[in-house]
Image (cartoon, helix red, strand yellow):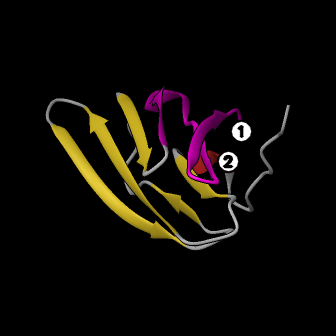
């Protein structure tokens, strides 16, 4: 089983999305809080995005090749690799 590498980021900073793939990818983040909020970011290879606000709700991360869901209150690390998305513990 392949393992996700750890991005260089402060683990206390909340929900992270890390592009571990070799190329730039668009990531669509959906937060299911009191109202649904969405954010789309373009991540270059090796880049990590941190959500600006703490999230205490389910979160989906979508790419053109897959998606993953996790509870934001657990400060998940979403890893994008070759179009797929997985959730890794910090």
User: Is residue 56 at all visible to an observer of this figure?
Assistant: no
Query: Toward which corner of the image does residue 10 lie, by quadrant?
Result: bottom right
Question: Dot 2: what SS?
Answer: helix
On the image, the x and y values in percent for residue 45 come to 65, 71
Q: Residue furthest front?
A: 65
Residue appearing at x 43%, y 43% in the figure: 61
Q: Which residue is tagged 2?
A: 11
Would residue 32 be counted in the magenta stretch? no
Residue appearing at x 46%, y 29% in the figure: 69
Q: Are marks 2 and 1 in contact (CB under 8 Å)?
A: yes
User: Is residue 42 at all visible to an observer of this figure?
Assistant: yes
On the image, the x and y values in percent for residue 37 come to 21, 45
Alpha carbon separation for disc pair 2 and 1: 7 Å
Mark 1 is surrounded, within 10 Å at the Cα level, by few (under 14), some (14 to 19) or many (20 or more) other residues, namely some
In which quadrant of the rendered image does the C terminus lie? top right
On the image, the x and y values in percent for residue 47 come to 62, 69
Mark 2 is surrounded, within 10 Å at the Cα level, by few (under 14), some (14 to 19) or many (20 or more) other residues, namely some
Q: Which residue is tagged 1?
A: 90
Residue range corresponding to the magenta coloring: 66-90
Q: Nearer the viewer, mark 2 or mark 1?
A: 1
Foreground: 73 or 87?
87
Q: Is residue 3 left or right of residue 75?
A: right
Q: Is residue 14 left or right of residue 22?
A: left
Q: Does label 2 or label 1 sit earlier along the sequence?
A: 2
Residue appearing at x 55%, y 36% in the figure: 75
Residue appearing at x 25%, y 49% in the figure: 38
Q: Which mark is residue 10?
A: none
Query: Toward which corner of the image does residue 26 lie, by quadrant?
Result: bottom left
On the image, the x and y values in percent for residue 59 come to 39, 34
Would residue 85 be counted in the magenta stretch? yes
Question: Dot 1: what SS?
Answer: loop
In which quadrant of the rendered image does the N terminus lie? top right
């Amino acid at each position: 089983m392949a393992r996700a590498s750890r991005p260089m980021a402060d683990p206390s900073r909340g929900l992270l999305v890390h592009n571990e793939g070799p190329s730039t990818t668009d990531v669509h983040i959906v937060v299911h809080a009191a109202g649904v909020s969405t954010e789309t970011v373009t991540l270059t290879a090796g880049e990590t995005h941190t959500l600006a606000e703490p999230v205490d709700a389910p979160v989906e991360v979508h790419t053109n090749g897959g998606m993953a869901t996790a509870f934001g209150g657990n400060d998940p690390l979403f890893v994008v690799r070759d179009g797929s998305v997985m959730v890794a513990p910090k």
